[in-house]
Image (cartoon, rainbow, N blue to C red):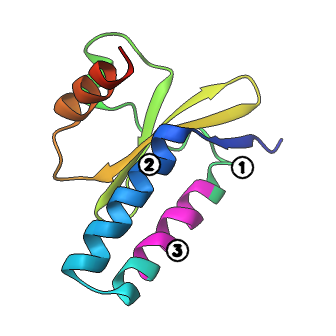
Amino acid sequence: MSFKIIILESAEHDLKELRGYIVKNFSQEIWQTTFDRIKDTIRNLKDFPYAGSIPEEFEKINLSQYRQVIPGMNRIIYEVRQDSVYIHLIAHTRRDLTALLTRRLLRTV
């Protein structure tokens, strides 16, 4: 069974921020390599949605429907619901996930 991939607006925004950072500090070529790796990882979730691990930050509060995959130096947080995979967040692995989630919650209030 192939799952439907839905990239949420928040994750689209994350990608734009990540692109700006990488292009500014590294190069367009590095961005393209990073983006290709992210796309391939997301594409694999169509067939293997449960391949990712449950992030420790989510496991502590019993949110086991959220998972993560880590392509290179980036983290993709997603949720599996029925026949769909919802991409919630894409961020560099060095970023503090708790702080990112808190900021995201405050932005929506």
- What count of labels does the image hold? 3
Q: Position of residue 13 (x, y in %)?
A: 44, 48
Label 3 environment density (alpha carbons within 10 Å; few <14, some 14–19, many ≥20): few
State whether residue 1 is above or below residue 39: above
Helix, strand or loop under label 1: loop
Residue extending furthest toward the top: 62
Q: Name the residue located 26 percent from the left edge and 67 percent from the top edge.
A: 21
The answer to whether the residue labelled 1 contacts the one labelled 2, judged by CB atoms less than 8 Å apart, is no
- The residue to which callout 2 is attached is 13
Sequence-wise, which precedes: disc 3 or disc 1?
3
Foreground: disc 3 or disc 1: 3
Residue neighbourhood size for the residue with mark 1, other residues' Cα within 10 Å, grouped as few (<14), some (14–19), many (≥20):
few
Task: Judge the density around disc 2: few (<14), some (14-19), many (≥20) Cα neighbours within 10 Å.
Answer: few
- SS majority, magenta: helix
In the rendered structure, which amino acid carries the disc numbered 3? Asp
Q: Quadrant of the C terminus?
A: top left
Q: Residue at x 41, y 73 (%)?
A: 34
Quadrant location, the N terminus: top right
Mark pair 2, 3: CA separation: 17 Å
Residue 51 inside the magenta-drawn segment: no
Name the residue beneath numbered marker 1: 47
Instruction: Give the magenta-colored segment's residue range.
Output: 33-42
Image coords of residue 87 (percent x, y):
54, 40
Which residue matches tag 3? Answer: 36
